[in-house]
Image: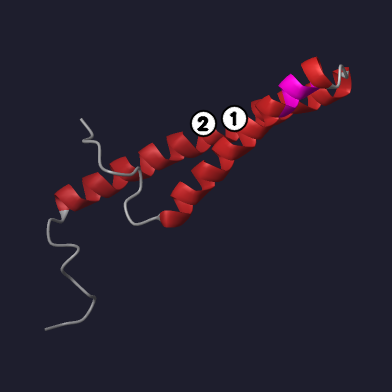
């Protein structure tokens, strides 16, 4: 069983930033959908918002699965080589 850590990929700030940008994209697509439906009364604007939400959601899901897989791989590697972080690639 994989233990949950503070982030999906510890030390990978870019991964976290991509997820945040995707969430913002999904929320903006949802707002565009609502604005197209209730404020602009325009079917095209609503459809664009729905498309943004769907594509953003799929990409977000892909990155979450990718992150969990990488976290499991890193944990398995750490369990096999407990002192892997201590080595710097040079001989003593």
Residue 45 drawn at (x, y percent): 83, 25
Left or right, 78 with respect to 60, comes to left
Dividing the picture into quadrants, the one containing residue 42 is top right
Residue with the mark numbered 2: 61
Residue positioned 49% across, 50% down in the render = 17
What predominant SS class does the magenta segment belong to? helix
Q: Which class describes the residues within 10 Å of circle 1: few (<14), some (14-19), or many (20+)?
A: few
**Tags 2 and 1 in contact by the CB under 8 Å rule?**
yes
Image spot of residue 92 (x, y percent): 11, 84
Most foreground residue, 34 or 46 = 34
Q: Is the N terminus in the top left, top right, bottom left or bottom right quadrant?
A: top left
| Near-viewer residue (3 or 32) | 32
Instruction: Determine whether the residue tagged by mark 1 lies in a helix, strand or loop.
Output: helix
Tell whether position 78 is magenta. no
Residue in the image at 62% along x and 32% along y: 26
What range of the chain is rendered magenta?
32-36
Residue beneath disc 1: 58
Taking 50 as reference, is 3 left or right?
left
Q: Which mark is residue 84?
A: none
8 or 86, which lies in front?
8
Q: Quadrant of residue 67?
A: top left
Apparent side of residue 9 relative to residue 4 in the rendered image (left or right): right
């Amino acid at each position: 069983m994989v233990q949950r850590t503070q982030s999906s990929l510890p030390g990978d700030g870019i991964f976290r930033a991509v997820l945040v940008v995707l969430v913002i994209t999904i929320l903006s697509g949802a707002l565009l959908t609502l604005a197209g439906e209730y404020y602009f009364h325009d079917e095209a604007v609503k459809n664009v918002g729905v498309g943004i939400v769907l594509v953003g959601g799929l990409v977000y899901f892909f990155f979450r699965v990718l992150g969990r897989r990488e976290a499991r791989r890193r944990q398995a590697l750490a369990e096999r080589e407990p002192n892997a972080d201590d080595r710097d690639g040079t001989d003593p």
